[in-house]
Image (spheres, rainbow, N blue to C red):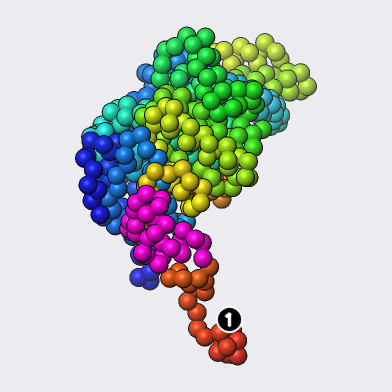
């Protein structure tokens, strides 16, 4: 029993100390942002590897999620003779929830894990240490461009996911199941509000982008510099990101749509 | 243990330094001096924290007490920006080379120049080729780090370390795992660079013969203390049995061949499980 309490105490202390370290780390990154904006090349390179290379998985997943929504939505809505509302249903689910959340989960798996492994291995092979000894701040040179790239990429990927998903829903609903094309778009246009739905979705994406990239970069930087350490850090990135995304999504949804 | 030479002769002075890693005491109140323009070696068995000492000098770790003076400045009391400024005067050669794996040889050597100077591309090219020529790898400029042998990677790292023309260079186990030819090349390079660039060199190593051949002064460290120090000739004549065993690589001596264990015969005939 006493051991259990001791263990609980140790775990709590360890997690608070990690929280503290990650906050200092974030502070250091934020301080470095202006200097990176003056060297846009570094940022562009990272936008490519973090953002552009994640596009394919986002596009394919978006298409299939939209198609499934079209199919499921049609069967439910047609019971009430409300097939014409399929467009609204698909668009609202995607723009408000599935777009930002699924994109963030996929992004954590595709780009987040890659970031953690890359930074972790750079640490294990003394590249970060070596940079420090060359009087180059690795947080500024290596971490900050990746952080910015993550924050910029996520909302764009989220919007693309939703758009491609709506196209997938259209493909199934209008193309295969015979929903009226005019009604599909007209209802969507009438019911989806730009500020309430689209902007809120983008805000969610921004928050997720910030969180996932922060987690991924911190886990990499804080890794135990061995192959086992890197593998554990990569796993932690994906798991912790998933928890953070789903938990934050609930809070954000309650704040954004709670009063409706 | 204090040196009698005048203090301004020393580029780096370590004073009464104590350092703990966790609960383990790595250094116990040690003092060392590194003379300008000389090659000073730090030797000792594996795991005595020789690399840690280099990281303390470079300001990557902070001691629990004591200080490190570099050219009169206390390394651990500098603000981060000042510390980075100071590090431009220090080169460090990591054991692994620590080359940036996504850049080729040319770009690795150009890296510190691009980060710290606004030189035009043609000037950077000239400087990089000069450094590569000095280490004999001008022809390998387009190779990636993964295509280099261990010895070549260390030479490229050396070219990178001298790219900003530092006043001091620290070598972390430069001879470990090198074949005889690469080893000869590295020995020659370290000595030649020290003379031609008027560097102050610190070599951390447990390769006794190689290091004694080029060092001007040697410190022997074991279990957190300086066991002996002096010129290579003085060390060879050391009165300490431990130093004698270390320098000659004897299998038995003050450090026993056998890890402490119960009597051999008793152990074989006992009925214990392990």
- Image point (52%, 23%), residue name: B131
| Quarter of image, res B270 | bottom right
Tell me if B117 is positioned left or right of B266 in this view.
Answer: left
Q: How many marks?
A: 1
Percent of width and height locating residue B29: 26, 55
Q: Nearer the viewer, residue A197 or B82?
A: B82
Q: Nearer the viewer, residue A173 or A253?
A: A253
Tell me if B103 is positioned left or right of B49 in this view.
Answer: right
- Image point (28%, 28%), residue name: B82
SS label for mark 1: loop
Magenta span includes B262: no
- Image point (43%, 33%), residue name: B194
Question: Which quarter of the rendering shows the C terminus of chain A?
Answer: top left
Percent of width and height locating residue B152: 60, 34
> In the rendered image, is residue B267 in sight?
yes
Percent of width and height locating residue A96: 52, 26
Q: Nearer the viewer, residue B212 or B12?
A: B212
Percent of width and height locating residue B143: 65, 26
Q: Which residue is mark 1?
A: B274
Residue A227 sits above or below residue A254 on the image: below
Question: Which quarter of the rendering shows the N terminus of chain A?
Answer: bottom left
Residue numbers of the magenta segment? B225-250
Magenta span includes B228: yes
């Amino acid at each position: 029993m006493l051991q259990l309490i001791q263990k609980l105490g140790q775990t709590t202390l360890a997690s608070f100390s990690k929280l503290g370290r990650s906050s200092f780390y974030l502070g250091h990154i934020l301080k470095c942002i202006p200097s990176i904006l003056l060297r846009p090349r570094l940022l562009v390179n990272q936008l490519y590897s973090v953002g552009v290379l994640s596009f394919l998985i986002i596009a394919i997943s978006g298409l299939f999620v939209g198609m499934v929504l079209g199919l499921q939505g049609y069967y439910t809505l047609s019971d009430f003779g409300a097939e014409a509302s399929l467009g609204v249903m698909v668009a609202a689910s995607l723009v408000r929830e599935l777009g930002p959340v699924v994109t963030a989960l996929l992004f954590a798996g595709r780009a987040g894990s890659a970031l953690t492994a890359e930074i972790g291995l750079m640490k294990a092979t003394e590249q970060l240490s070596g940079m420090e000894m060359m009087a180059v701040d690795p947080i500024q040179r290596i971490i900050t461009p990746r952080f910015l790239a993550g924050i910029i990429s996520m909302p764009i990927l989220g919007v693309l996911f939703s758009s491609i998903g709506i196209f997938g829903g259209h493909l199934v609903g209008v193309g295969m199941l015979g929903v009226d094309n005019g009604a599909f778009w007209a209802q969507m246009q009438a019911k989806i509000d730009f500020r309430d739905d689209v902007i809120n979705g983008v805000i969610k994406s921004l928050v997720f982008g910030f969180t996932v990239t922060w987690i991924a970069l911190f886990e990499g930087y804080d890794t135990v510099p061995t192959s086992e350490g890197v593998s554990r850090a990569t796993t932690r990135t994906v798991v912790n990101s998933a928890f953070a995304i789903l938990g934050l999504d609930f809070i954000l949804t309650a704040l954004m749509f709670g009063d409706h | 243990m204090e040196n009698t030479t005048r203090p301004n002769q020393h580029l780096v002075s370590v004073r009464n330094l104590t350092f703990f890693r966790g609960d383990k005491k790595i250094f116990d109140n040690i003092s060392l001096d590194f003379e300008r323009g000389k090659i000073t070696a730090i030797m000792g068995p594996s795991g005595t924290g020789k690399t840690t000492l280099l990281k303390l000098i470079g300001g990557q770790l902070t001691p629990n007490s004591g200080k490190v003076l570099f050219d009169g400045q206390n390394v651990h009391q500098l603000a981060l920006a000042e510390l980075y400024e100071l590090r431009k005067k220090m080169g460090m050669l990591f054991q692994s080379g620590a080359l940036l794996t996504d850049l080729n040889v040319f770009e690795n050597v150009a890296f510190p120049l691009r980060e710290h100077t606004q030189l035009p591309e043609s000037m950077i090219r000239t400087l990089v080729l000069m450094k590569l020529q000095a280490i004999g790898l001008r022809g390998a400029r387009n190779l990636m780090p993964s295509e280099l042998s261990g010895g070549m990677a260390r030479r490229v790292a050396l070219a990178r370390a001298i790219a900003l023309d530092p006043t001091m260079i620290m070598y972390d186990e430069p001879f470990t795992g090198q074949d005889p030819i690469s080893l000869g090349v590295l020995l020659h390079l370290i000595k030649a660079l020290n003379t031609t660039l008027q560097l102050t060199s610190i070599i951390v190593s447990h390769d006794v013969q190689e290091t004694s051949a080029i060092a001007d002064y040697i410190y022997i460290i074991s279990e957190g203390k300086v066991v002996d120090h002096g010129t290579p000739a003085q060390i060879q004549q050391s009165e300490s049995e431990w130093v004698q065993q270390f320098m000659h690589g004897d299998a038995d001596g003050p450090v026993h061949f056998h890890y402490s264990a119960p009597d051999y015969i008793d152990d074989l005939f006992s009925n214990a499980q392990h």
